[in-house]
Image (cartoon, rainbow, N blue to C red):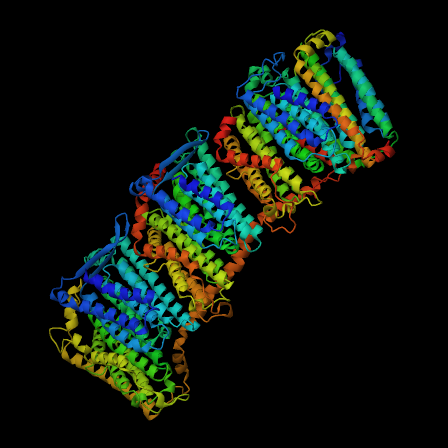
Amino acid sequence: MELLIIAPLVLALVSALGSKWNKWLSVAFSLVGFALIAINSNSVYRAINEKNAFFNIVDMPWLGETIHFSLGLDGITFVLLLLTNILIPVIVLSLNSDKSPAMIPLILFMQAGLNGVFMAQDGILFYLFWELAMIPIYFITLIYSERDSFATTIRFFVYTFVGSLAMLASLIYLGSKSVNGSFAYNDLYNVQLGLRESIWVGAGFLLAFAVKIPLFPFHVWQPNTYTYAPAQGSMLLSGIMLKMGLYGLLRWYFPMASESIDFYQPIIMTLAVIGVIYGAIIAMRQDDMKRLIAYSSLSHVGLIAAGLFALNSSGFMGGILQMFVHGVNVVGLFIAVHIIERNYGSRSLNELGGIAKNNKAFSILFFLVLIGTVAAPLTNGFPGEFLLLKSLFDYSTTYAIFAGLTIILCAVYMLRMFQFSMLGEETQGTQNKHIPMIELLPLFILAFFVISIGFFPQWYMDIFQNSTKGLLNIISNAKGVLS
Amino acid sequence: MIAIAIVFFGALALLFLGINKEEKQLQLASSLILGIAGLAVFAESKSMISFDALFAWVPSSMIAFNPTAQVIAAVMAFMAMIIVNIFPAVKRKGMDIIGLMMFSLCGGILMLGSQHLVVLFLGIEILSIPLFVLAGSDKDNLFGNEASLKYFLMGAFSTAIFLLGAAFLYGGTGTMYFHEMLLRLSFSEHFGEFPVLVKTGLILVSVGLLFKVSAIPFHFWSPDVYEGSPNRIAAFMAIIVKIAGFAAFAQLLSAFAPMQTWYATWMLPVSIITVLGGNIIALVQKSYKRMLAYSSISHAGYLLLFLMQPIQENIRVLGIYLLSYGLGTAILFYLFDKYAQGEDKSVTIFSGISKSQPLDALALIVATFTVAGIPSTIGFIAKYQLFTSAFPSVKWGVLLALIGSAISISYYFKPFRVLFNSSSEVKGAFSITWKSVCLLGAVLGMLILGIFPIILNWIF
Amino acid sequence: MLSIFHSLEISHYIYLSTVLFSIGLFGVLFRRNAIILLMCIELMLNAVNLLLAAFTEYMGDKQANGQMFVFFIMVVAAAEAAVGLAIIVMVYRNTRKTDVSFLDQLKDS
Amino acid sequence: MNPIALILFFPLLGFAVNGILGSKLPKNVASWLGTLMVLMSFIVTLGYLNQIASDVENSIKWNAYTFLNIDGLLFKASFALDRLSIWMTLIITGIGTLIHLYSISYMDHDKNPAKFFAYLNFFIFNMLLLVLGSNFLMMFFGWEGVGLCSYLLIGFWYQNPSYGHAARKAFVMNRIGDLGLLLGMFLIIKNYGSLEYADVLPAIAQGNGGTVLLTSIGILLFIGAMGKSAQIPLFTWLPDAMAGPTPVSALIHAATMVTAGIYLVIRCQALYSLAPMAQELILWIGLATAFIGALIGLRQNDIKKVLAYSTVSQLGFMFVALGVGAYTTALFHVTTHAFFKALLFLGAGSVIHGVHERQDISVMGGLKSKMPITYVTFLIGTLAISGFPLLSGFFSKDEILANVFHHNIFAYIVLVFSALLTATYMFRLLFLTFHGTFRGSDYSLSDVHESNWKMTVPLIVLAVLSVFGGLLNLPHYIMHSGGLLSNWLNPTFLIFENPIHAEMSTEIVLISIAIGVFLFGLIYSRNQYITKGLHPESPQSGMGNVLKNKFYFDEFYDKAIVKPIEFLGDILFSLFDTLLLYGATFSVHPILRFVGQLNRKIQNGNIEYYLIYMVGAIALLLGLNLLLA
Amino acid sequence: MDVFSNLPLPFLILSFLTILGALYVVTSKNPVHSVLALILTFFTISAHYVLLNAQFLAIVNLMVYAGAIMVLFLFVLMLLNLNKESEPIKSNLWGFAAAISAGLLLLVLTAAFQTSGIAVMKANAEGIGLVKNLGRVLMTEYLVPFELTGILFVSAMVGAVLLGKRDKNDSVKSEETL
């Protein structure tokens, strides 16, 4: 599996040298490569079938004896790897590489970092990959942003960096407590913290993850970055990077600082639910499609975070499924916006309209992804949202009712976006232009997932069902130790 | 010892041989000498070869290099080599400038090995006196003159302070060997109150060293002097002086380990002020060079945090940090020197070099990441190890240091604002030269050490 | 030595040299002429020398470490003086001034 | 292959074929394909009718696959064809077939009927999902699916922004109901650990679960029903939904989808029978809807709007029936209503078609000469809905009234009054459209034409059904063994529904009242619009305006809910998010810069200051150390 | 003050002279005067050395400081003809600041030593300060530093040369300078 980290780097170097076939090469390699890796390794079989949370697959000393280059794998990790290595080629496909030569190497570099984040089984290694994934996106946004790139990106970078440093502090603290200062996942997990210190450690983790997810008050970097970043940047950020935060909650925060969960649960829940409604209400009034999607993503992710913090199996299962689904949907939406902007030179709802007239296929695909986001049944959005709301309901009816408003509000702003961009009378901007079929290829790929998850979610849930059980056991045991 | 000998006699020889050669021709030779010195001392540290026979006449234990100190000496030598090598030579005959740099390098190495107040004092002076001169080596430059005089006066002043402290230490303990000082005190004093002479002396001596490593509030000389003096001299000061200063400081404090809890009480505030102050002030600098000066101040702060805990066992961490700091700073100074030919000294000098000079752009990025401590470079490894080893004793200090390094991002990354501009004027065509090879080597070094830090465990 | 000095204590020498040192310090802070500053620094060094000599004497240090140190301090002081005066001359050559208060071209802008 | 799979498969196939390569197919093929598919599932259903009929316990089950499995908590994609669902299926596919047939020529002029038929088939599929699903989840799938389809079909002519608005309104309002439904489902899962009817309903029937729980579940589910079946306060979307093509209105917004709410309640009969509070709520909501809908219907001039409000009102009738626990009656009315309301809509469509896409009855009149078949069928429909004796509507409505009479006299009075209104506005519509003088200005009566056989055949069939539909459930005073429907359905009820057996005299009174109501409506509107020849646009009294403007419901919602939320959105975005939060967070940088600037004073380049500072610092260090010691 | 009670007179006088000279060095307007005062101070300090049994040190002090260094200073002063009251005297405020900070340091130091009396017993160590002993120590224990001063001097020399040497390009300026 470590090939998942090495291969993209090599590929990045290759594509950095530049050739007009970069795009297709990289896509082919990352798809085929991932397929081969996934099929050949029997550890994937283990990951899916054993109820064994995060077993080790690679382990070699990296810095002294305390830090090992150790990668782990289980169902949860695998499903996120699946997401990453499917979305990255899709994103690369959606890009017209002649305009932005440096993009592909950076994206591939980032792919390596992301794969690492999801597999890292050593605290410091996790932090390392966490930052490694940040660097390319920083440069992507910096180089290809449309306006005041430096101000936006430096704010985004520093803001997230502060969070990451808080996490580093927590990790260092845990490491200083663990047996002979080792940062291995299990050693850190075995550290027994008192309530106060675990609250501090948890604060460090939560800050990092809340910024990355982003949770309600910590989302300030998000709208501008999503809006001004190049479309691919927004896709990477919202589609995959944001999952790093949620994954961090699952994999690192809950087991490591489990004593503090009871303390943080109500706070985070409230913030998340506030974020759900807040994002939705703001999204209802946006004119810039990307900004609209940014706020909608804030709302959806808030729901996921709340579901995870409900700490019951339906919440976890739904949350993890929804991570995958949200990645697919939001990337689909951004691709659609990207296509519209590329062909009609605007993404302002006021200037658009009537695109559906000449582009039937595009409008169908767009609508498919859109109702996926709205979580209509038989699309991928529904199962996750259903489970999340259920878990919230089991936690507290009030929260469920408030969070449930999202299924109304989401319909409002998403359909509004569709109405004003695709339907209605054509504007002079959008008159009889046809979108080339080739640009729709990524959307076709995503549409497959929208439908297949919508009809057969259990196929996907089976991947991480056992591992989630294992993880839940770990967490409940850890909580049990204290209480 | 061997390094000092090689460097000194090599420099002497070159001074006489190259009396009327262009400095450009002597660069390679001198860097060769430095390289040999570095290799020799490194080999000695790994006990591949031993030069004890050569120095059998050395009667006393005033100078003793432990392996780590030898490695750090090697690092200093290589740093000096890089600096001598990549910076362009000045238009003048003879190599007195490079020679002086090598002399002061001798002083720096001497400080590493000093176990005795006198030797430490001599080391400091041998390190400083050539630098006083070098700061003004560009004689017609008024800034250079001012820098030189400022540095000299303040340096001499700090020397006086240091000496007073040394005298008190001597008076308090009756010896000048660091490691005997506390042993000379009577048993009760080991655990109870330490004699006021010792305390005062230690404070004053530390002030002298804090001045050398330019920790706030003894930093006033460094921004001005860096700005005034020629770029390569500034780089030399920023790197060699800091390495030597901290190595010596570590030597001294490791002897006073029993007093650690005491000296932490007043050194912790200094280091925190240094970290935060250095970073915050660097934030508002217009000149990139001054910004680098303040960033080096903030690095001094991080290192001071590290000194706040029992040092002996993991002094190697110090070495790793100094190595990464030196590499990064050297490259940043070099790039500044290369592009700041005109009046403009702000970051806009780097405008658009990613197109015209990709290698330089890469070097700038990697070096910035190194000094900022971003992963995938040695900088992260260094900073991480520094913080982890300092954490148990100074938790809050480390937290503040983390905040400081978060602040530092926003000024380190300033060049990226213009780096990717589509530059109107092309700053020279991209060509493979000896310098660019060295540069590439340094960049790869930073990256490889960052990705395979296991190598560091072998080096240190 | 002379027995009348037996009532002397080391602390007196400490006070004396501290006073001297502080006077030199005061001079450094008070004067502006670079040369005078240098002289004041020499004064401070001498205060230290005196102190070292006193310590040697009162500890009866057979190795005479203190006095050794004094020698080295003198050596260094000489070297410093040479270099310093050279610098001062250079500055004077360029700016016709030895007044340090005019050295304020380099500062935070 | 499982029959249910077949039934579901055909419409899905039609959807897939028409949807994917519809634009390639020739128009006729696409339309006939769509129609055929629905017909197929109708036939299949018929084929299994007697198997179901043979024994109460018989019901065809199909467990397709496990949709979700959260450690043990199974959500199965399972379906069942029992007596209730087959009844609904027959209505859906049967009437669906007719309406498809009708649409073939109705959508003839449209650019791509393929898309239209794809949507229709997809709707049928979802509707079947709704009624065939043997658990709440599948029901919910269909539930949301039909909502989606109605969104698509209302907005079928998407060039027109107002249609799009109507479509979104429909979808969102349905969503509000869906939230309630969803929460109800969560409550069920929490307490019964399953969503299968087979697990939940018997458990309820055996009485585990307190009244509070049952009531709250009932109310939550009913909120869903309110959204879907356009009950007050969530009814305003239905009239707007008339933006869609007329067949859509007939199929979705009259015959099938809107009755999903009734289906839901009947399905949960056991639940509601044990939750009297919820039942009361249903009764009064239904009553209000029936009354207000009828009132508004009085003053509408858009032919489809009138029918829409009559639908609202009729749905109210059904809920009233449910409210008083007459489930069979409700289903009976669903059935008859499906017949005559579909008939009326299709007739209206035929009229619209005939007068070239005009819907305003104020420009019609005297059309009966030009389109006789349409007129006759429309007349039958009108008679049926307003309760002309021995027509389908008469029996079903009369049963409702009888049940209500025995339950609550006040409700009875109100309901009678709304029945009276029903008769009135229906005859008003009839007279204004077909009788009297022709009022068209910009076109002449001569170019009004009757529709072709593809449109009239369904009309005729439906007319026949509306006439004899009453036979499906003859009241016991005619057939003492009990009506067909009640015998068909009663055994499936987990909690036995006791039919009211009033003595003859009361029945006669009630029937005569009903007839009187009918006659009054007939005579009143004849008097108004034939003898007086009152013009529909004639100036209205104050009350008239209120009715014309639908009690200002839309305006109220706009002012009270939509606008405030939008305002809130603007405020949050521009003030809180952008200004406050963003500003506050990133004001750190300027503050730090300010602090840094202070250093200029200190680092002023003058060495004397530097020395003083240093000495001060040293003194400070020493002094502190002294004090600490 | 009992500090000065029963102190031998010569010591008091010497200290008095020393401090007086030092003060004059600091305060006199005329640089030349301060040089002379400094030389006086050095003489008194040498006397102190004698009292402290550091006879050789006393001599060296006279030779090196009073002889070499001070002459060098004088030479430079004459060279730059600063032998008049060139320096604009600073404001009293400045004097205050300087005095305060210097006094502060003094105060702190003395206070530090007040708190704990330094008890260094007076050992009778005859002849430590004689050349014989010093030479032995210098050539045995302090051999390495002794050698190392070579580097110091070479670098100082080279540096002084580097700064003092006239380059071709500034020959004109240096002509009219000196």
The answer to whether residue E4 is seen in the rendering is yes
The x, y position of residue A190, in whole percent, is 38, 34
- Quarter of the image with the N terminus of chain A in it: top left
- Left or right of A382, for residue E178: right
Nearest to the observer: residue B262 or residue E55: E55
Using the image, determine if residue B291 lies above or below residue C76. below
Q: Which of E15 and B374 is in front in this view?
A: B374
Residue A203 visible in this rendered orientation of the protein: no
The x and y percentages for residue E122 are: 68, 10
Given residues D138 and A79, the one toward you in this image is A79
Q: Is residue C93 above or below residue D126?
A: above
The quarter of the image holding the C terminus of chain A is top left
The residue positioned 65% from the left and 40% from the top of the image is B336
> Which quadrant of the structure image shows residue E128?
top right
On the image, the x and y values in percent for residue B56 come to 61, 12
Q: Position of residue C88 (x, y in %)?
A: 79, 30
Establish if E170 lies above or below B9: below
Relative to residue E109, is residue D590 depicted above or below?
below
**Picture quadrant of residue D557:** bottom left
Count of labels shown? 0
Q: Quadrant of residue B289?
A: top right
Side of B272 where D98 appears, left or right: left
Q: Residue furthest bottom?
A: D531
